[in-house]
Amino acid sequence: MKKCLIFSAGDFSLAQKEQVERTKDDLVIACDAGFAHCICAGITPDYIIGDFDSMKETALVVQEAFRSFRNRHPDRVLSLSVRKDDTDTMFAVKFAMQKGYQEFRLFGMLGGRRFDHALANLQTLLLIRHHNGRGTILDPSCTIQIAKNETVCFPAGTKGYLSVIPVDKEARGVTLNGLSFPTQEENLFTDSTRGISNEFLPDKAASVSVTAGTLLLIVTHIP
């Protein structure tokens, strides 16, 4: 399935280059200073989108590469107003959806100075799922996805901690299998931390099921 890769200006590491898999049908969008991560990953975006408030804070070599891209592909640079309703990342997701993309891999979504933008990127992940798409935030320290009225499976060999956080007031019928702390048809609430820091079992597949509701599934990597 074709997918859209979006790079924003949060944390990104060289070790993530192997996660950047692009096929000929994929769409790659850099959001503002996220263009620097594209350069780091050795990938040329199809579009650069943003109000470009953070581009001026990047290294000179990145700014020069941006000017070169804009001179060669002026139609592929979408300049947004600073005064707007959507973040650059949300705009990029909606732009890709209009082009028929339903699978998203999101880089550079967490960290940085703006915690509010990290939360906004979680909202963007929810938007994708609410429109029947699939999105994954890939961060140096964790991966995040959404489970909505469904079962999400993790293959044997997955390592790290799994936190299951309800987005709605209540997530009903939450069943966890293949983890250190399994559950069976439990209800989770937003004012409870019961779903934090479960752990995958060695060489055992795991799954998270929710009968009614939406969950954030956060896998924190173990070095």
Image (tube, rainbow, N blue to C red):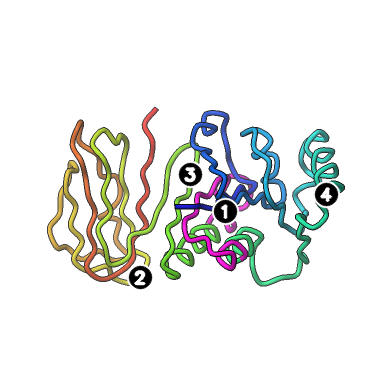
Q: 143 left or right of 191?
A: right
Determine which of the numbered discs, if any, sits on residue 138 in the image.
3
Tell me whether the residue at label 3 lies in contact with that at label 1, contact meaning CB atoms closer than 8 angstroms: no
Percent position (x, y) of residue 54? 75, 49
Please check the rendered image and state whether residue 17 is part of the magenta-colored stretch, yes or no.
no
CA gap between label 4 and label 3 equals 27 Å
Residue 149 lies in what quarter of the image? bottom left
Percent position (x, y) of residue 185? 14, 63
The residues colored magenta run 95-118
Please check the rendered image and state whether residue 110 is part of the magenta-colored stretch, yes or no.
yes
How packed is label 2: few (under 14 Cα within 10 Å), some, or many (20 or more)? some
Of the residues under marks 1 and 2, which one precedes in the sequence? 1
Q: Amino acid at mark 3?
A: Leu
Looking at the image, is 163 positioned above or below residue 223? below
Q: 176 left or right of 90?
A: left
Q: Which residue is mark 1?
A: 115
CA gap between label 1 and label 2 equals 21 Å
